[in-house]
Every structure is written in structure tokens, then in C-alpha cells.
Amino acid sequence: MVVGWFATGALLCGLGVVLGAFGAHGLRDRLATDMLAVFETGVRYHLIHGIGLIVVAWATSRWPNHWVESAGWLFVVGILIFSGSLYVLAISGVRWLGAVTPVGGVCLILGWCVLAIGACRGAP
């Protein structure tokens, strides 16, 4: 699964750059300043956790266990829910999506915690 996590992280980082450029150039004149900031927050967490998946790939090669694998899945779900809801909120203005965003944030937080457990459990 090392290659899978690395490839997923790399692809998500590439998508994050595309979305960041889209926000900076395509949405700058179309969104209110506060909604552009919401979009940029989504991009920031998207990119950070895409890199987190590359870390998961490395950790999987070093400490292969279900904790590390679970961290990868939590990062993927977190990016989809956290960043995805912020992207849609910023572009559509549908405010109820703000209630979904924390679920993604919890997944991202749990991903880091679970990754730490995986490292501790896998370390000699």
C-alpha cells in the first residue's frame, strides 16, 4: 500500500495546487473576500494532508500496521469532507455546509493521532 498512499498523496497535492491557482486567479474577482479566505483555508488543509499521505506512505514502509493504514484513510476522508465542504461553501454560498466541515476536521485530527499510535506500536 506504500505506492498507493504515495500516489494518492501526490495526486491530491497536485489537485490542491490546481485548486489554489483556480482560487487565486479564477475566483479572486468573483468571490467576496471572506469566501475567498474560506476557499484558501480548504486549499491549505488539502495540501498539508496530501503531504500527510506521503508521510503515511513512508510510515507504512517503516511500521506496517493497521494504525498507519487507518491514518491514511482518515486523511483522505478528512480532505474530502473538510476541504470539499469549504470549496462548495465558498463557491455556492450554501451555509449549512459549515456544519459538515468540523466532521472532516475531526478526521484530520484523528489521522495524526492514529499515525502517532501506529509509529509507537511499530517502533522496536
Image (tube, helix red, strand yellow):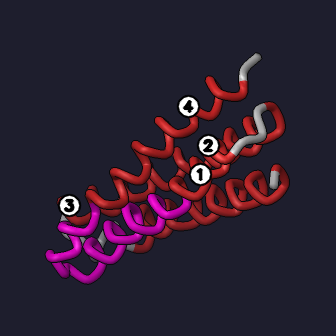
Residue topped by disc 2: 67
**Of pointers 2 and 4, the one earlier in the residue sequence:** 2
Task: Report if the CB atoms under discs 2 and 1 are less than 8 Å apart.
Answer: yes
Query: Which stretch is magenta?
Result: 76-101
- As measured in the structure, the alpha-carbon distance from the residue carrying label 1 to the one carrying label 4 is 11 Å
Q: Is residue 52 magenta?
A: no
Residue topped by disc 4: 117
- As measured in the structure, the alpha-carbon distance from the residue carrying label 2 to the one carrying label 4 is 7 Å
| Place of residue 82 in the rendered image (x, y in percent of width and height, measured from the top left) | 37, 61
Q: Residue at x 53, y 53 (%)?
A: 75
**Of pointers 3 and 4, the one earlier in the residue sequence:** 3
| Place of residue 50 in the rendered image (x, y in percent of width and height, measured from the top left) | 60, 51
| Place of residue 14 in the rendered image (x, y in percent of width and height, measured from the top left) | 66, 60
Element type at marker 2?
helix
- As measured in the structure, the alpha-carbon distance from the residue carrying label 3 to the one carrying label 1 is 36 Å
Task: Report if the CB atoms under discs 2 and 4 are less than 8 Å apart.
Answer: yes
Q: Is residue 74 left or right of residue 23?
A: right
Q: Residues within 10 Å of mark 3 (few under 14, many from 20)?
A: few
Element type at marker 3?
helix
- Vertical position of residue 27 compared to residue 38: above or below: below
